[in-house]
Amino acid sequence: MSGSTSARSTALGEGVHQIRVPFPGPLDSTLVYAVQTDEGLVLVDAGWQSDQAWAGLVEGLAEIGHAPADVTGVVLTHFHPDHTGLCGRVREASGAWIAMHQADYEAFDHMTAERGSGWLDAQLDRFAAAGADAESLEQIRAEGLGAPPVDRSSRPDRVLGDGARIGTGGRSLRAMWTPGHTAGHVCFALDETGIVFTGDHVLAKTTPHVGSFVYPLTEDDPLADFLASLRRIRDSGLVTAFGAHGAPIADLPGRSDELIAHHEQRLLDLIDSFAPGEELTIWAAAARMRWHRPWSELPAMGRHMALSEGAAHLRLLLSRGVIEPVPQSDPVRYRLVPTPAGTAPGAATSR
Ligand SMILES: [Zn+2]
Ligand SMILES: [Zn+2]
C-alpha cells in the first residue's frame, strides 16, 4: 500500500494517514494513524509528550487537512508513554475521548501513582528479590533509574473490551485484545479494508519487549500471552499491518511466525544455559541470556528491561514444567526439572 508522502505524513489509502511523531530514542518516531470513521476522525495512538512531538503531530494533521481540534477520539494500543503521551493535549484541543483496554488502564493508573521519590527504592527491592548482588544494586543506585514519564493528563476516559467497535457500518475499527507486550495491548482492525494497526504487538524489524516485572515470579505469564496473541493475529486472516514503529508489515502471518520462532529459540537457549543440577536466580539466568550488549555493560535501565525479559522467559519455562523453584530458596532459585535419560529438556513442550 503506497500513497503520497509529505514531510510528516503518508496517505495509505482508504481514508487512512500515517503521521510520524518524533520520539527521542532509537525508534525515532511513533507512527500515529489518523482514520476517518463514521464517528469522525480517530487517532490510533498519539505519540510522546514533548513540544517537538506535539509540533510533529500538528504538522502531520495539517498536511492531511486537519487540526487537533477535529479529532473525535483517540484509541490507544497500550499505555506506554510513546503512545499515550500526547493524548491529554489532543483532548484539551478537541474534547476528544480517549479509550484503552481495561488492563492497561489499570497499569496506567498504577504507573502514574507510583512516580516520585520511592520509585528507585521500589525497583532496587525488586532487583534484590530477583537475586541481584549488592555490587550491582549499588551501581544501579549510583546511576539512577528514571521513572517512566507517564503523564496523568493523558488518563483515558473510556475502556475498550475485546471486539469493541469504534464507528459503525462501513468504517469501523475493531479492537483485538493482544496481551503480551503489555497486559492490555490492543490491535485495531479496519475490517472493510483488511488492514490492522498492530501497535507494538508486531513490528516489522524490532522484536517487541515482553517482560515480567514482579519478582519472584507470579501467576502472570506475559510471554505465554504474547505467543498466544501472535497466533491469534497470525490466524486472523489479516495480512497487511501497520505497527507503531518502523516499516509497514506486508506479511503479518509470516512476521508473527518469525517472532514466535525467535522466542522459542530464546527459551531453548535459556534451558541450555542451566547446567544439570544448577540453581539460578532470575538475575543470574537473565545475565546469561544474549542481549544487544554483554550483561555487564548494560546500563541500569537496560538491565531493568533485560531482567524483566529474562523473567518472562523463565516464567514460561515454569508453566511448561521445564524448570521448578528450589524449595525454601530466598531469593528464589530455579533449576531444571530432571527428565528421563535421553529426553532433551523442553522437547515435549507445546506451543
Ligand atoms: Zn510499547
Ligand atoms: Zn512503542
Image (cartoon, rainbow, N blue to C red):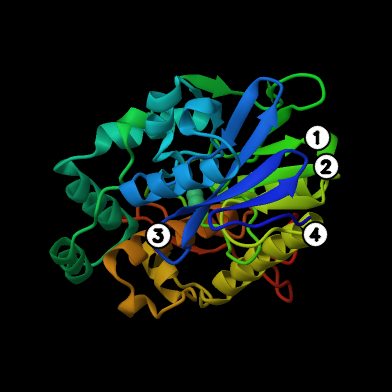
Quadrant of the frame with the C terminus: bottom right
The kind of secondary structure element at disc 2 is loop
**Amino acid type of the residue tagged 4 in the rendering:** Asp
Q: Is residue 115 above or below residue 331?
A: above
Q: Are marks 1 and 3 in contact (CB under 8 Å)?
A: no
Q: Is residue 191 above or below residue 248?
A: above
* Nearest to viewer (mark 2 / mark 4): 2
**Amino acid type of the residue tagged 3 in the rendering:** Met
Image point (37%, 25%), residue name = 92
Residues packed near mark 4 inside 10 Å, few (<14), some (14 to 19) or many (20 plus) = some
Left or right of residue 82, residue 141 in this image: left
Q: Is residue 169 above or below residue 212?
A: above
Q: Are marks 1 and 4 in contact (CB under 8 Å)?
A: no
Name the residue carrying label 4. 251
Q: CA distance from mark 1 to mark 4?
A: 17 Å
Name the residue carrying label 3. 305
Q: Which mark is residue 191?
A: 1
Task: Measuring from the top left, give residue 218's x and y in whole percent.
Answer: 45, 43
**Amino acid type of the residue tagged 2 in the rendering:** Gly
Front one among 294 and 350: 294
Name the residue carrying label 2. 194
Q: Are marks 2 and 1 in contact (CB under 8 Å)?
A: yes
Residues packed near mark 3 inside 10 Å, few (<14), some (14 to 19) or many (20 plus) = some
Q: CA distance from mark 3 to mark 4?
A: 28 Å
From where the camera sits, is residue 211 visible?
yes
Q: Which numbered disc, 1 or 3, marks the residue that appears first in the sequence?
A: 1
* Nearest to viewer (mark 3 / mark 4): 4
Q: CA distance from mark 1 to mark 3?
A: 34 Å
Q: Which numbered disc, 3 or 4, marks the residue that appears first in the sequence?
A: 4
Q: CA distance from mark 2 to mark 3?
A: 34 Å
